[in-house]
Image (cartoon, rainbow, N blue to C red):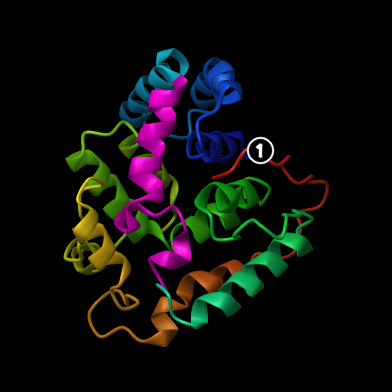
């Protein structure tokens, strides 16, 4: 198991008392693996310190405002690829099937494109395969990092870590296309409503269906379980 990816998955889940208790252990994993550049590890330690020492209800409120209310910060990958188009439904089915073939079973209520779940899946894959798959949505991670940086959120570090781990680095054109999309403040209800009514998004100049389905196609190639690798246990709570 790739413990670093498992740790990053945990950091993006809804804050719980269990996560607060585990913060020290997560810090130790990141330092022991040393897969993430030291500058970003330091930022992750700052986030972990906040998670361990801050009021739990304040942490949960912050999480909801960032990731649940704001579409531009959605932790659902296909939100940034398909929006509300009908392609998203089939993509969900395909991804759920891939998890099942890798012996990662999820409940019917869970959406398979939820990023913590996706990272949990990749944590069970061979490292080259996992980092190759991370490269497909790397431009999404880079944009989320930038939007969180503008909000001075310590969660920026998680997405910076994912970009650093990805085998393929995001292209400037893809990042620019995403950054041009609406990114309303979580307290601006009118702007939030307008953002949720936008058409599905395609990324990059002149992209078509083949490009936007790149992530799905890449994950489809990561189906065969590695010999002797056990699936990661499911987190107790997902939002």
Query: Which residue is at a point 54% across and 41% down the rendered structure image?
Result: 9
Residue 186 lies in the magenta stretch: no
Magenta residues? 56-82
Can residue 226 be spotted in the picture?
yes
Query: Which residue is at a point 49% across and 21% down the rendered structure image?
Result: 31
Quadrant of the rendered structure where residue 4 is? top right
Label 1 Cα neighbours within 10 Å, binned few <14 / some 14-19 / many ≥20: some
Give the image location of residue 18, x and y in percent: 61, 23
Give the image location of residue 164, x and y in percent: 38, 44
Give the image location of residue 70, x and y in percent: 32, 53
**Dominant SS type (magenta):** helix
- Is 67 situated above or below 169? above
Query: Which residue is at a point 29% across and 45% down the rendered structure image?
Result: 145
Query: Which residue is at a point 27% across and 54% down the rendered structure image?
Result: 143
- The residue that mark 1 highlights is 235
Quadrant of the rendered structure where residue 54 is? top left
- Is 65 situated above or below 115? above
Q: How many marks?
A: 1
Can residue 221 be spotted in the picture?
no
**Quarter holding the C terminus?**
top right
């Amino acid at each position: 198991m790739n413990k670093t990816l498992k740790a990053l998955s945990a950091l993006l889940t809804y804050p719980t008392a269990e996560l607060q208790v585990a913060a020290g252990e997560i810090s130790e994993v990141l330092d022991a693996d040393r897969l993430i550049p030291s500058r970003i590890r330091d930022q992750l330690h700052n986030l972990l310190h906040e998670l361990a020492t801050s009021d739990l209800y304040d942490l949960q409120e912050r999480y909801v405002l960032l990731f649940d209310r704001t579409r531009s910060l959605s932790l659902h990958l296909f939100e940034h690829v398909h929006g509300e188009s009908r392609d998203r439904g089939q993509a969900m089915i395909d991804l759920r099937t891939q998890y099942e073939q890798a012996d990662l079973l999820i409940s019917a209520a869970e959406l398979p494109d939820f990023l913590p779940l996706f990272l949990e899946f990749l944590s069970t894959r061979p490292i080259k395969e996992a980092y190759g798959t991370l490269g497909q949505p790397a431009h999404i991670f880079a944009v989320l990092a930038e939007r969180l940086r503008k909000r001075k959120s310590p969660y920026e570090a998680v997405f910076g870590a994912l970009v650093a781990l990805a085998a393929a680095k995001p292209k400037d054109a893809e990042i620019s296309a995403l950054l041009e999309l609406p990114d309303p403040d979580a307290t601006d209800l009118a702007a939030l409503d307008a953002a949720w009514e936008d058409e599905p998004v395609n990324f990059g100049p002149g992209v078509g269906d083949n490009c936007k389905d790149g992530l799905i196609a890449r994950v489809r190639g990561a189906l065969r379980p590695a010999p002797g690798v056990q699936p990661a246990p499911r987190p107790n709570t997902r939002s």
